[in-house]
Amino acid sequence: MVEEKKGKEEENLRYKYIGFDVFSLKSKKFWKNAEEEKSYLEELKRRKEKGEREERDHSLVFVPVFSPVEKWVLSLTSFLMILSLFLPWFTFTRGGTVIRYNALQYLFNFGTLMTYSGLGGALLGILAVMFLLIILSSLLLGIFNLLTLYGKTNSEEGYLRKVKRSFRLNCTPFLLWLVAVTLSIIGIATPLASALGINQLKDSFNVVALVSISGYGLWISLGCWILNSVKANDL
């Protein structure tokens, strides 16, 4: 009988250890009083108005992906991706005259450019097509970024997923640019390009020539692609 009673006591003790009777069924109130809750909510509101992160103190349970300032910066870079199409992407010198082409002029004159690219062979034509794809992807992604940033979703989590997917695509024109740079590093023979009278085009087209004809519209776009792509990794 003694052993049976002892066994029951040990069984009951085991249940206490694993948590059945350790804590009471009634949970304590989180806030000490209503004043403490009000003070905390006012502090959160103040931080939000200042653009600070709204994370819980000493907690990694919830951390916002980006602040209003970061959203504004990403809006600016996306807008510049569209605006830069009206800025010079290519600058040539023919004799003493400087000729500037913006991205839209490149699109409208692509057929003529492909005809002239035949003077340099197939690789120069491929390079011309690469820049066509770069310009189109930059324009479409700039618009898509803005629509995503200011679009409506059912939840904050869904919104952040959409933004992440959108900004990940910004690496597309950047990767195309790297392919164009790689082709120019290899070097493209252009034995008849001198017939065009453009000072930057010699018997071969290389990375030095590519950099020399690149306008600030292209460099602005390049910076926007990189910034947006990097931000996508933080989301």
Image: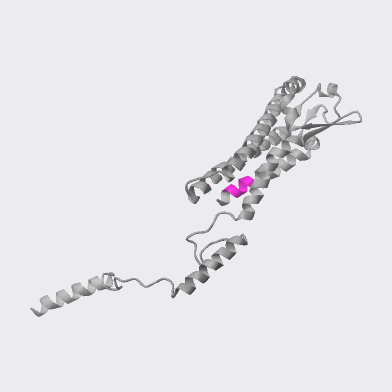
Above or below, 204 against 66 in this view is above
Residue situated furthest bottom in the rendering: 2
For residue 209, above or below residue 58: above
- Look at the image and tell me whether residue 52 can be seen: no
Q: Up-down: is 175 above or below 193?
A: below
Badge count: 0
Residue 143: x and y, percent? 63, 38
Question: Which residue occupies the foreground of this view, 15 or 138?
Answer: 138
Residue stretch in magenta: 228-232
Residue visible at 55% across and 45% down in the picture: 163
Q: Residue at x 64, y 55 (%)?
A: 69
Viewer-closest of 48 and 109: 48
Q: In the rendered image, which quarter contains the N terminus?
A: bottom left
Q: Is residue 15 left or right of residue 146?
A: left
- 96 and 187: which is toward the camera: 96
Residue 197 picture quarter: top right
Q: Is 231 one of the magenta-colored residues? A: yes
Give the percent coordinates (x, y) of residue 37: 48, 70
Q: Residue at x 60, y 38 (%)?
A: 144
> Can you tell which quarter of the image residue 94 is in?
top right
The image quarter containing residue 202 is top right
